[in-house]
Image (cartoon, grey):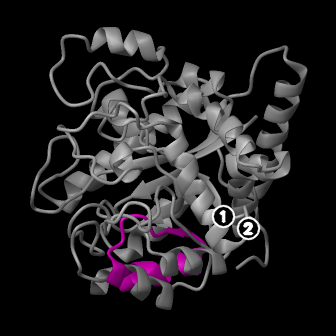
């Protein structure tokens, strides 16, 4: 079954972690065997495994912050440095596209052609597989020097933006803070609506979430977000927030970072033993039951988002194992149509609505 993964930090892994994603996962692990640090030698994502797992399309991020509290590989002292880093990550995706490894998708026609090519190749089982599709998103809007610059980012192919990340950003309060949108953030969200850039509410503080929805009239998503009812933490979304996204025609991509899947997991202390992809199916099922439909749940794995196998479900070796979710959902009584929607169809339909003339 084809898969759409709504959150992968591919360029960040390639440039800030110096990983050659054209190599296999095992090759990268071998290269990092002697490299110290969290997640090193434990990666799960590379282009060959994306193809093996039938991940036909993903949302590939640009990730750089300027928060005044530098963290290695993410934070920079000035917005200009964050801008340069994000531009370099964008150039990496363009270089992969020039090498025919990926196809950057920016409109409905290209999306339809891409998904059709993958479906035909998958059904035939022969011939050269199509490139992996990438919709470029931005996680943390800090690299955008000012809201007036947003037009340039749109012209360069950015189609989704999550203004917040961890802590307080230039545009919004994020995970672990309670601040709302900044004045710059309000202007940014308004301009996003005018251009048709999809608002990714992931990482918003509760206050920033509701303030953004007051300003932004269009489709709202949560690219990689789980359910607060199952794992009580501000990083997850409440029932009211999940319903609000569904009411906007949005989709929530369930993330596979195990601290977001099971209560009580402590990073760098707890073991992922016994935490499996079934926990991800729990969050998918919760979204479906809460909203009364399978149309608002999807995958946003966030695999290799600063961690590796040590903080992923224990029954997942590489991203190709996302295919196991289909069987888990079937065991819970989901129909083939519902499973296909969750695995890829909901994200494809959402992008089509967002990019079609006259869509909200």
Instruction: Please state which of residues 344 and 13 is positioned toward the viewer in this rendering.
Output: 344
Instruction: Please state which of residues 156 and 166 is positioned toward the viewer in this rendering.
Output: 166
Q: Residue at x 41, y 42 (%)?
A: 9
Q: Is residue 197 magenta?
A: yes
The residue tagged 1 is: 288
Count neighbours of disc 1 (C-alpha within 10 A) and say few if under 14, some if 14 to 19, many if 20 or more. Answer: some
How far across and down, in percent of the image, does residue 335 sit? 83, 49
Quarter that holds the N terminus: top right
Q: In the displayed orientation, state which residue is furthest to the bottom.
A: 214
Q: Residue at x 29, y 46 (%)?
A: 85
How far across and down, in percent of the image, does residue 75 sit? 18, 51
**Magenta residues (range):** 186-208
Q: Is residue 73 magenta?
A: no
Q: Residue at x 78, y 79 (%)?
A: 358
Which quadrant of the structure image shows residue 27?
Answer: top left
Q: Is residue 18 left or right of residue 61?
A: left
Which quadrant of the structure image shows residue 73?
Answer: top left
How far across and down, in percent of the image, does residue 360 sit? 70, 79
How far across and down, in percent of the image, does residue 192 sit? 51, 75
Q: Secondary structure at mark 1?
A: helix
Q: Relative to 35, does residue 134 appear above or below in the rendering?
A: below
Q: Secondary structure at mark 2?
A: loop
CB-based contact (under 8 Å), mark 1 and mark 2: yes
Q: Is residue 70 left or right of residue 48?
A: left
Q: Relative to 144, does residue 302 appear above or below in the rendering?
A: above
Q: Relative to 209, does residue 317 appear above or below in the rendering?
A: above
The residue tagged 2 is: 293
Q: Relative to 317, does residue 61 appear above or below in the rendering?
A: below
Mark 1 / mark 2, whichever is N-terminal: 1
Count neighbours of disc 2 (C-alpha within 10 A) and say few if under 14, some if 14 to 19, many if 20 or more. Answer: few
Q: Residue at x 40, y 76 (%)?
A: 148
Picture disc at residue 219: none
């Amino acid at each position: 079954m084809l898969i759409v993964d709504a959150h992968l930090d591919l360029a960040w892994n390639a440039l800030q972690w110096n990983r050659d994603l054209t190599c296999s996962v095992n090759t990268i692990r071998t290269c990092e065997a002697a490299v110290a640090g969290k997640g090193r030698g434990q990666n799960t994502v590379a282009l060959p495994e994306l193809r093996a797992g039938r991940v036909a399309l993903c949302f590939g991020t640009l990730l750089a912050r300027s928060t005044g509290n530098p963290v290695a590989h993410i934070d920079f002292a000035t917005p200009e440095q964050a801008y340069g880093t994000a531009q370099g990550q964008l150039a990496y995706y363009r270089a992969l596209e020039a090498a025919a490894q990926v196809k950057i998708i920016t409109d409905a026609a290209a999306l339809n052609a891409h998904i059709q090519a993958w479906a035909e190749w998958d059904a035939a089982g022969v011939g050269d597989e199509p490139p992996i599709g990438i919709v470029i998103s931005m996680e943390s809007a800090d690299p955008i020097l000012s809201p007036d610059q947003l037009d340039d980012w749109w012209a360069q192919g950015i189609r989704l933006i999550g203004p917040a990340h961890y802590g307080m950003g230039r545009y919004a309060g994020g995970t672990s803070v309670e601040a709302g949108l900044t004045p710059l953030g309000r202007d940014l969200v308004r301009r996003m609506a005018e251009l048709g850039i999809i608002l990714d509410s992931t990482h918003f503080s509760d206050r920033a979430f509701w303030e953004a929805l007051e300003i932004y009239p269009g489709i709202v998503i949560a690219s990689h977000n789980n359910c607060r009812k199952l794992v009580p933490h501000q990083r997850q979304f409440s029932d009211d927030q999940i319903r609000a996204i569904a009411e906007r025609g949005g989709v929530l991509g369930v993330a596979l970072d195990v601290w977001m899947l099971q209560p009580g997991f402590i990073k760098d202390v707890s073991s992922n033993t016994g935490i499996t992809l079934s926990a991800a199916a729990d969050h998918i099922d919760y979204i479906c039951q809460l909203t009364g439909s399978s149309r608002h749940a999807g995958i946003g794995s966030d695999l290799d988002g600063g961690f590796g196998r040590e903080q992923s479900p224990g029954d997942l070796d590489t991203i190709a194992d996302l295919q196991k979710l289909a069987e888990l959902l079937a065991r819970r009584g989901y129909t083939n149509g519902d499973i296909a929607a969750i695995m890829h169809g909901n994200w494809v339909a959402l992008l089509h609505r967002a990019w079609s003339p006259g869509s909200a």
